[in-house]
Image: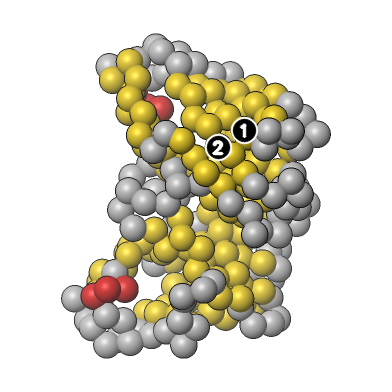
Amino acid sequence: GAVVSQHPSRVICKSGTSVKIECRSLDFQATTMFWYRQFPKQSLMLMATSNEGSKATYEQGVEKDKFLINHASLTLSTLTVTSAHPEDSSFYICSAPTRTNEKLFFGSGTQLSVL
Amino acid sequence: GENVEQHPSTLSVQEGDSAVIKCTYSDSASNYFPWYKQELGKRPQLIIDIRSNVGEKKDQRIAVTLNKTAKHFSLHITETQPEDSAVYFCAASITGNQFYFGTGTSLTVIP
């Protein structure tokens, strides 16, 4: 299947700092990418839909100024958690649908721990 | 919007037995239904999928059935093995523009 790469896999940071997470589609172009947050033993919570060349679409209750999303190219979307706080600690995971067969593939996820 | 419900939330089976996970969806326009397997701390992996023009699809020990009229689809795992233990998610999509996930089923296969 298609490959979606996500970095970093794990981040530990101090409260108040910002953290950037990258999501790349390695062998296909992704005009759309999805960002999810997942708590232990829970489902994938869609945070936002990243659209290449335009503003991201955020789900209700997700602060767009807190979770900045940039989709500058057809293969890269970034999620920046600004002024991170301990309650932002979570597993963040991106995904992208292929344009040809519309299958959805996931990045490897980023475990964020804010101290 | 689409609403996907998944049952059961947890499932324990003896090794060798079958496991069945069921999902329902609300939007009749949904036409693509993938299933993902997620091991702890790892990414969800696509294990099987079905499109709305097909009623059943099988891949070795895994099969998916779709009932469009009733708006439900199911994952069937036969001859379960300990390595099948994971969380399984169903999803419904309309032409790949949006994916709506079920709440997940934690499957434990007891040796």
- Figure disc tally: 2
Query: Is any part of residue A5 visible from this angle?
Result: no
Which amino acid is tagged 2? Cys
The C terminus of chain B - image quarter:
top left
Q: Position of residue A70 (x, y in %)?
A: 57, 80
Per the model, the C-alpha gap separating discs 1 and 2 is: 5 Å
The residue at 29%/69% (across/down) is A89
Above or below: residue B10 compared with residue B29: above
Residue A56 marker:
none
Element type where label 1 sits in the image: strand
Q: Are marks 1 and 2 in contact (CB under 8 Å)?
A: yes
Which amino acid is tagged 1? Phe
The disc numbered 2 marks a residue on which chain? B
> Which residue carries the number 2 mark?
B23
Q: Nearer the viewer, residue A89 or A63?
A: A63
View extreme (right): residue: B53
Left/right of residue B83 with respect to residue A14 in the rendered view: right
Left/right of residue A97 with respect to residue A113 in the rendered view: right
Q: Residues within 10 Å of mark 2 (few under 14, many from 20)?
A: many
Above or below: residue B110 compared with residue A67: above
Above or below: residue A53 compared with residue A111: below
Element type where label 2 sits in the image: strand
Q: Position of residue B25 (x, y in %)?
A: 62, 44
Query: Is any part of residue B65 visible from this angle?
Result: yes
The N terminus of chain B - image quarter:
bottom right
The disc numbered 1 marks a residue on which chain? B
Q: Position of residue B12 (x, y in %)?
A: 33, 25
The residue at 69%/30% (across/down) is B67
> Which residue carries the number 1 mark?
B73
Image quadrant of residue B34? top right
Image quadrant of residue A48? bottom right
Pick whichever of labels 1 and 2 is earlier in the sequence: 2
